[in-house]
Image (spheres, helix red, strand yellow):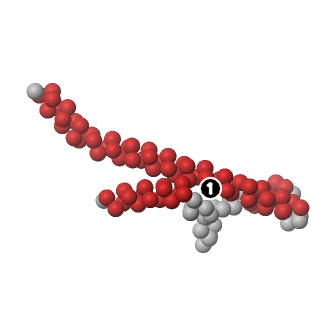
Amino acid sequence: MKNVLFVILALTLCGPAVADESRDAKQAQLDGACEVARQKKLIPLRKRFVEECVANKELPNREECERFYSDYGNRMGGRAPLYYDLPECEAAFDYRQSQRSRN
């Protein structure tokens, strides 16, 4: 009987921690899917801008053009990052918000 009570007590105390860990893992998975989807959109744009930069001799060489456009699409200054409106990113955002509304 004492063992059963101990197990019940342990599960009661550890249950929320396990739930938080699985929730964190799910959030990380959703965030990762969002970033993969964003990069699928951003990589071709970055390549195009680099090629235009090289062709138009906007910067001294290809390496400088690549460095200049390497963060294209990320948050810069007051500009919002691109492609957080993709379904994968909206799912990650909604999941994060659902946790906040539970608290």
| Res 51 quadrant in image | bottom right
Instruction: Left or right? Give the position of 78 relative to 63.
Output: left
Residue at (23% x, 37% y) in the render: 11
The quarter of the image holding the N terminus is: top left
**Residue under pointer 1:** 38
**In the rendered image of this protein, does residue 99 appear above or below residue 5?**
below
In the image, 101 versus 21, the foreground residue is 101
* Percent x, y of residue 43: 71, 54
Circle 1 crowding by C-alpha within 10 Å: few under 14, some 14–19, many from 20: many
- Residue drawn 52% across and 51% down? 31
Q: Is residue 3 left or right of residue 39?
A: left
Instruction: Establish if 25 lies above or below 59.
Output: above
Given residues 68 and 27, the one toward you in this image is: 27
Q: Taking the image as drawn, is residue 67 in sight?
A: no
- Please state if 67 lies on the left or on the right of 79 as rendered: right
Q: Residue at x 61, y 61 (%)?
A: 83
Q: Is residue 2 positioned above or below 16 on the image?
A: above
* Disc 1, SS: helix
- Which residue occupies the foreground of this view, 94 or 68? 94
Q: Please report the residue visible at 42 percent of the width from the left and 57 percent of the height from the top.
A: 96
Q: Hey, what amino acid is under mark 1?
A: Arg
